[in-house]
Image (cartoon, rainbow, N blue to C red):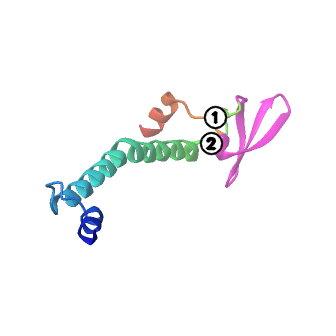
Amino acid sequence: MNNLLFLLMAPADNGQGAGGGSMTLIFILLLLLIFYFFMIRPQQKKQKQIEEYRSKLSKGDKIITIGGLHGKITDVQEKVFVIEIADGVKITIEKAAVAVDENEAKNAQK
């Protein structure tokens, strides 16, 4: 009876030996590497382009906010823009609220 219990509790040797664990580790590292190059790195590049575009905006530039408001920048401060959305109507928005389309991001690189 003790021998039967010992056989049931003993780990099964599937023929993988010690190499099975290292193959799993290599597979996980490969997946992480692929995830980095196809997901994380492109997103970081895109975010850098957007921030560069926003930092180059100056007084007189026409912008569109994330909420869809069209306006012209009348004042640039450290973290905010004051934009004029109609004659005599000015609002203050965060710099992060400025939408960026692909054409504007490409122009920022040049």
Residue stretch in magenta = 68-97
1, 110: nearer the viewer: 1
71, 102: nearer the viewer: 102
* Residue 58: image tag: 2
Q: Position of residue 31 (x, y in %)?
A: 31, 48
Is 40 on the left-hand or right-hand side of 18? right
Is 82 on the left-hand or right-hand side of 60? right
Looking at the image, which residue is at 27% across and 71% down?
2
Q: Is residue 1 above or below residue 70?
A: below
Q: Residue furthest front?
A: 1
48, 56: nearer the viewer: 48
**Mark 2 near mark 1, Cβ–Cβ under 8 Å?**
yes
* Residue 101: image tag: none
Q: Residues within 10 Å of mark 1 (few under 14, many from 20)?
A: few
The quarter of the rendered structure image containing the C terminus is top left
Q: Residue furthest right?
A: 88
Q: Residue furthest bottom?
A: 2
- Quarter residue 97 falls in: top right
Q: Position of residue 90 (x, y in %)?
A: 82, 37
The quarter of the rendered structure image containing the N terminus is bottom left
Kindly state the secondary structure of the residue where label 1 is placed. Answer: loop
- Tell me how far mark 2 sits from mark 1, CA to CA: 6 Å
Q: Main secondary structure of the magenta part?
A: strand
Residue under label 1: 61
Q: Amino acid at mark 1?
A: Asp
Q: Amino acid at mark 2?
A: Ser
